[in-house]
Image (cartoon, rainbow, N blue to C red):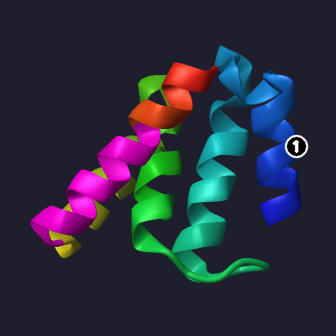
Amino acid sequence: MARFDMSMASNGEAATGVAADVLFDLGMAYYLGKDVEADIAEAHKWFNLAAIRGHAKARQYRTELAGEMDAAQLREALGRARQWMGMH
């Protein structure tokens, strides 16, 4: 999944509105630690990006996950999302 993450990000496909489901799936992978090391900041980043693109379930997961994170983790997640958006 991590390889998928990087290939999608590098070729720009994940930047399209159509990719909200892909971004949500990446969030789930990082949240659950499926095929990648679990990372809640990374999960929040992908849920946030999917939510921005209109994915309703991602909005719900992002909100619930934010409630489980401390301030430093949330800052890290938001910073990662901003960085990704700035590159795409």
Q: Residue at x 49, y 61 (%)?
A: 42
Q: Residues within 10 Å of mark 1 (few under 14, many from 20)?
A: few
In the image: residue 8, left or right of residue 58:
right
Q: Residue furthest left?
A: 71
Residue 11 x %, y %: 87, 27
In the image: residue 13, left or right of residue 34:
right
Considering the numbered disc 1 on the image, is that residue within a helix, a strand or a loop? helix
Is any part of residue 28 visible from this angle?
yes
Is residue 5 shown in magenta?
no
Q: Residue at x 43, y 26 (%)?
A: 52
Q: Is residue 59 above or below residue 12?
A: below
In the image: residue 73, left or right of residue 8:
left
The image quadrant that residue 44 belongs to is bottom left
Q: Is residue 9 above or below residue 41?
A: above
Residue 65 x %, y %: 30, 65
Q: Which residue type carries mark 1?
A: Ser
Q: Which residue is mark 1?
A: 7
First to last magenta residue range? 70-81
Nearer-the-camera pick, 1 or 84? 84
Nearer-the-camera pick, 60 or 14? 14
